[in-house]
Image (spheres, grey):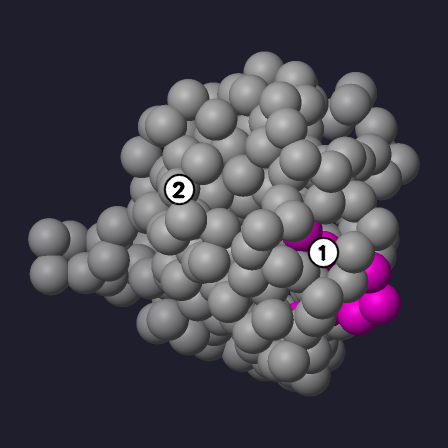
Amino acid sequence: MSTEARRAIERVAHSIHARGLTHGRTGNLAVRDGERVVVTPTGVSLADVVADELSVVALDGTHVEGPPPTKEAFLHVAMLRVRPQANAIVHTHSVHSAAVSCLADVDADDPIPPLTAYYGMRIGTLRMLPYFAPGDPAATGAVEKAARTTHALLLRNHGPVVAGVDLDAALDAVEELEHTAQLFLLTRGLPTAPLTPAQLSALAAPSGRTHP
C-alpha cells in the first residue's frame, strides 16, 4: 500500500488526538488507496497510530492485510463506495458534536444550523442518522443512503463521520463541525441568524469550496 497514505493517516491521527477531537481509544480514519482502503486498527488510540501498523480492507469491507481493522471500518467503506470523489474519512467522538447527537429535539435533516460561512463551505448539509450500536453493520444501508446526498453525517448518540477529497480536507470539516456544534449549544435558547439559502448558495458557487 502507498507509503504516502500511511504517513498521512499517522500524521492526522496524532493531530486529531492532540487537538482534543477524540479521547481514549475512540475515533478512526480511512484513506482510499486504489481499490483498497487503509484504516486505523481496532483498539489503538489515535495518539499511538503508526504508519507501518495499519489495516487494509477492500471496498466491500473484507480484511485484506495488517492488524484487525477498526470495528467501524464499514462506515468508511460505505461512504467511499457512494462518494467516488472522496478519498478519506474521519470519524471522531468530539464532545460538542456528540452532545448535539444526544439532543432529542433536533431535526435529523438539519441538526446544526449554518451559523458561520466556514460551516457553509466545509459542511454545507449535515444529516443525523438513527442510533446504531458502535460497530453494528446494520448501519451500512443508512450510511450509504445519507452519504449519497452529503459528505457529513452525525451518528445519533455517537459522533461525526465526514468524507473529504483527502484527510486534511476531512479534518478541516470535522473541526469546523465541532466548532459550530459548540456555537449551537452556546446559543440554544437565544435568537440567532443562520446563513440564508441564498448566502449558502453563494458559498457553493465556483468561487467557493465544493464538497467531495
* In the depicted structure, whether residue 192 falls above or below residue 33: below
Q: Is residue 127 left or right of residue 212?
A: right
Residue 36 spot, x, y in % from top left: 48, 26
Disc 2 versus disc 1: distance between alpha carbons?
Answer: 22 Å
Q: Which of marks 2 and 1 is in front?
A: 2
- Work out whether residue 197 can be spotted: yes
Name the quadrant of the N terminus.
top left
Q: Which residue is drawn at 69% across and 83% down?
A: 186
Classify 10 Å Cα crowding around label 2: few (below 14), some (14-19), many (20 and above): few
Q: In which quarter of the image is residue 23?
A: bottom right
**In the image, which residues are magenta?**
21-29
Q: Which residue is drawn at 88% across and 36% down?
A: 133
The rendered magenta stretch, by its main secondary structure, is classed as loop
| Three-letter code for the amino acid on which mark 2 is drawn | Ser
Q: Which residue is drawn at 45% across and 58% down?
A: 8
Closer-to-camera residue (167/202): 167
Circle 1 residue? 27
Closer-to-camera residue (115/181): 181
Say which mark, if any, is on residue 2. 2
* Proximity of marks 2 and 1: CB atoms separated by less than 8 Å: no
- Work out whether residue 92 can be spotted: no
Label 1's element? loop
| Three-letter code for the amino acid on which mark 1 is drawn | Gly
* In the depicted structure, whether residue 116 falls above or below residue 203: below
Residue 43 spot, x, y in % from top left: 84, 50
Name the quadrant of the C terminus.
top left
Residue 136 spot, x, y in % from top left: 83, 28
